[in-house]
Image (cartoon, coloured by chain):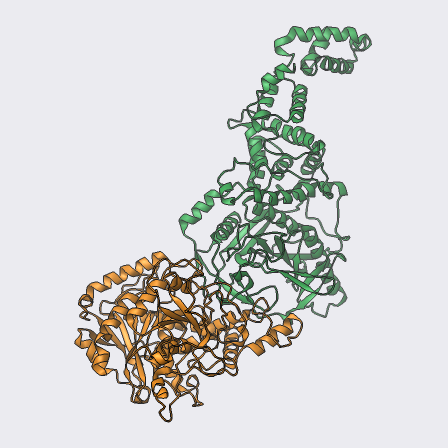
Chain colours: A orange, B green
Amino acid sequence: MKSTRPILNVARASSTKPSPFTWVHPGEGIEARVTEVTDQRLKGKRIAIKDNFMLRGTRTTCSSRMLQEFESPYTATSVKSLLSSAASITGKTQMDEFGMGSMTNNLPPGSPPVHNPWNLDAAVEGKDEVQVRSAGGSSGGSAAAVKGGQAWAALGTDTGGSVRLPASYCGLVGLKPSHGMISRHGVVSYADTLDCVGILTSEVDDARLLFDIMSHPDSMDPSCASAEVRHRAEGVEHEARHSMKGLRDGRLDGVRIGIPIETCLEKDLTPLDLAPFIRHLRSLGATIVPISIPSIRLALPAYYVLACAEASSNLARFGGGWYGGQQSGLKEPDGSVDRRQWTRRWGFGPEVKKRILAGTYALTAGAFNNSYLKALQLRQRLRSDLDAIFRSSQPQDLDDVTEAPSRGVDVYMHLTAIQTAPILDSTSSTSQDARGYAQDLLTVPASLGGLPCISLPIGLGADGWPVGASLTGQWGSESVLMDIAKIGMANYNSSVE
Amino acid sequence: MQSLPRPAGSIIRLTRALRHPRSIRILARNARPASPSSARLASSSNIIPSSRHLYRDSSSTPARNYSSAAAHQSRTLGETSTAPPPVSEPGLEGWETVIGLEIHAQIRTDHKLFSASRTSFEEEPNTNVVPFDAGFPGTLPVLNRQAVDLTVSTALALNCTINPRSTFDRKHYFYHDIPASYQITQHYNPIATEGKIELSPDLDPTLDRDVTVRIQQIQIEQDTAKTTKLADGSTHIDLNRAGMGLMEIVTEADMRSPKEAGAFIRKLQALLRRIKASDGDMEKGSMRVDANVSIHRTGTPFGTRCEIKNLNSVRFMMAALDNERRRHLKHYLDKPDVPLRQETRGFDEAKGETFTLRTKEEAEDYRYMPDGNLGPIVILPGYLESIRRSLPELPDDVRRRLPEQYGVSLADTEVLLSMDDVEGSGVAYFEEVVGNDQSRDGKQAVNWIVNELLGRLARKNEIWTWDRVPPQTLSSLLALVETGEMTGTAAKNLLKHLLEQATITADTDIKLLATQMGLVAAGDSGADTLAELCRAVIEKLPAEAESVRKGKEKVVMRLVGQVMKDSKGTADAKKAREVLLSMLVGEASS
């Protein structure tokens, strides 16, 4: 798995030809002009950011017509952190409009979907019938930029799998941290209680470095964990490490890894047999434990209700006329009501409209109790179920410190996706059929639980395209999670390839 | 307005001026820039900013508010109107009015509720705006803790139950005054519930009965942008107001007349100002009231309720409520078979009439949803206790305590309260004059403050400040009068002199000054002197002296007057009368 492809590593943005970028810095990348450089940890590293991160001096379009001309008035806290460690921001990447989608094909009219660069070698070599596959979504541009070699790493956002799925399809490491670990200030909200800043890299260590740089309290984001909560999480993690004695020696002795039975799907939804990787982990000393998360299926509809409801609220601000500028060359109607209706009709794509409508309905007085409120209850139920499977306790809750089960697991594992990267010209959309439902079963629970989850490239499916496995840990356990991921991956890829 | 029953105009004007003077509202606002942090002010009640004005010249504010005449008349009013039986209101006999209020008061913080923008008033439009205020994407709300402190103070002052865990919700609607298209408010778990304000004729002579107005709940929420419609039909929006912190205070429908609603609002305003939670200024828009009103025949169920939105003065609120209930009455009498439509109405101040804004069928669905960014406000017992301890004495407590402790009248207490309704420095000044050990007589002190000091200042068209005549100075002056070292007349002359000199400090030695000016009493120490003066006056005014000798004792006062004049006021008039009578009649009659 080579991470750079010299022939293609020049980034280009295009609205008509497939490109991972919406905007590319004309020089070597935006150096730290918006903030002071305090260390050199990212010196010379080119990092791409999804086009829903604010970066002063660039447009932030969210791949929506609505924000085509929106100039970022400030810079996101997470991006500032990268810049203060001397990173170069190389460009901003395509995404499904406002993060809604899983193939980076919900784009402004006329924009081609982002291509998965996995087989670009083949394309360059001029092979016949090169399959054009999706890079996944919604952070498909970010994944493609890293896999295509235009960026060393990229930031994405993950609301229900939008970083992990592209990572799986493109053969990358994708980290969705615990909700509240990385500030969301300056990231355009889709669903506040689910949105996380995510990281796409080739190596686990790179993800860890970026996470360490961006994970800190932020006074501009009230949902960003305080120093106190972080300190408690470290304490919990320190405690947990006592039982995982192998970690010190690059082994997994004492590590308990759960396999939820609910995530073991039928054969056509299993692109890769997880068994060899499980055996590998066991050979490193890990204990594999079959577990059950009973409410996992019940909780899925909750995700749709909550995400859409929050989206309908968050996206209500667009069209009000305070920013975004006049759409050049178009005649807008007069009158604030007419103009708002016109702008929203014109500016939002079909998927966004669909979710706004669904979310609006869920919040109406007549539906609220039976939709939104029920969804909140189901989410709570899933959270209790998840808490019950971990050996460590949830460090965020001060009021109800429940005794974590001593036989609990440290992480649980399953495949990240039900398939390899889908072919782009196929007309079927994954999110509309039963397969989409199964896919969400794999990515959504960690989002609903606010838990850290890392997708690792563990091999290739029968079609020769990459497949990822997801490890999910207790809230705030990124450090242990990445230790386990790194040790698990250390000798695995070479042993397969 | 014309249908409101009105007592004699002058009295109502004076009482209104005393209870709710425009000048006080100006004062409240002036106090703010002078004090960088209200939190600091709260802990230092002794620090009185020099810009504190009692009143200011204003076309609509007679400068005589605090003249002794005004104080006197209001005192008379207070004594005569002791709890008359409930007044039946003309035209509404047999009907009962039911009123509930919803008050929005801007919270007096340095910056907005969820952003770092400065709070401002009447500044260049759209100058105090950060991206959050304009609903820019990627921005998140950061709660202003000061707004929570002040709301909790208010809730405690209103005897509310404080919710240990309250949360924020979003209320959605599309309108140009709300850039994010939702208002952050507290719909499901408000910060406080179940409070009350007691209204009593004992403390407010304008009332007819004791009323307990229950507070249903208090919630914290964002203010909207200010919309201005110009004559050319264009609409202008000022985001300076967008996102300022508001307290929404909702009462139960416990008021039974516009008068009671007015008394409630005035009481709430005074309370909010005193705890520095809000300027409570309806004319300036820092406090806005929506009023619900219905009427029904006594003994029958409540009638249809209509809401009147955005009332911006106590007077207009009372007028709107009266107009609205009379509209209901006319409807019930003219069309008894047609139900009254439930409506939201506005008030046309020029016409004095309410008008339809929207009917219930058009009611909007606000799609309330918990805000996903803001965590709950968790109130711990220790925090609550610290807020409780920092609360100042509330106006009604002063109204009860001062008459009881010092024997001063309620009317004089009102004057002391209205001298400064933010810091309460009028009351503090009075107590400073009286002294910790109550060495001065309270009634005497309040008379001097209200009639002499304020009265004289009012005649000079001047404002009262703490340092104009330091309380120690006035206290020393009163001490000299009490010991008889100085007569009242001489003391008044000295005060007059002090006010003209304008160089008094707390260290000024009043006794020395009085001696130097020859104002020390000719009484006790100088009995011989007094006798000499009297003898001289008898010689000077033989005719009057003769009348007294013949039994016309009243004429002795003319002689006393001459003694006072000759002594430049240092003589003790009472003693002079005794001396004169003993000289002329042979005995002192008391």
Q: Residue B540: where, in percent of width, then height? A: 79, 8
Residue B322 in the image: state x and y as whole percent. 71, 56
Percent position of residue A113, x then y: 45, 83
Q: How many marks?
A: 0
Q: Quadrant of residue A34?
A: bottom left
The residue furthest right is: B543
Depth check, front residue: B48 or B562: B48
Q: Nearer the viewer, residue A47 or B275?
A: A47
- Most foreground residue, A437 or A170: A170
Q: Position of residue A252 (x, y in %)?
A: 19, 71
Horizontal side of residue A143 vs A57, given as left or right: left
For the N terminus of chain A, the quadrant is bottom left
Task: Name the residue nearer the viewer: B379 or B506.
Answer: B506
From where the camera sits, is residue B96 visible? yes
Residue that extends furthest to the bottom in the rendered view of this protein: A128
Tell me if A5 is positioned left or right of B285 in this view: left
On the rendered structure, is B496 left or right of B185?
right
Q: Is residue B530 above or below residue B5?
A: above
State the residue at coordinates (56%, 63%): B134
Q: In the rendered view, would you say B510 is above or below A55? A: above
Image quadrant in which the C terminus of chain A is located: bottom left
In the rendered image, which quarter is residue B66 located in?
top right
Q: Is residue A194 visible?
A: no
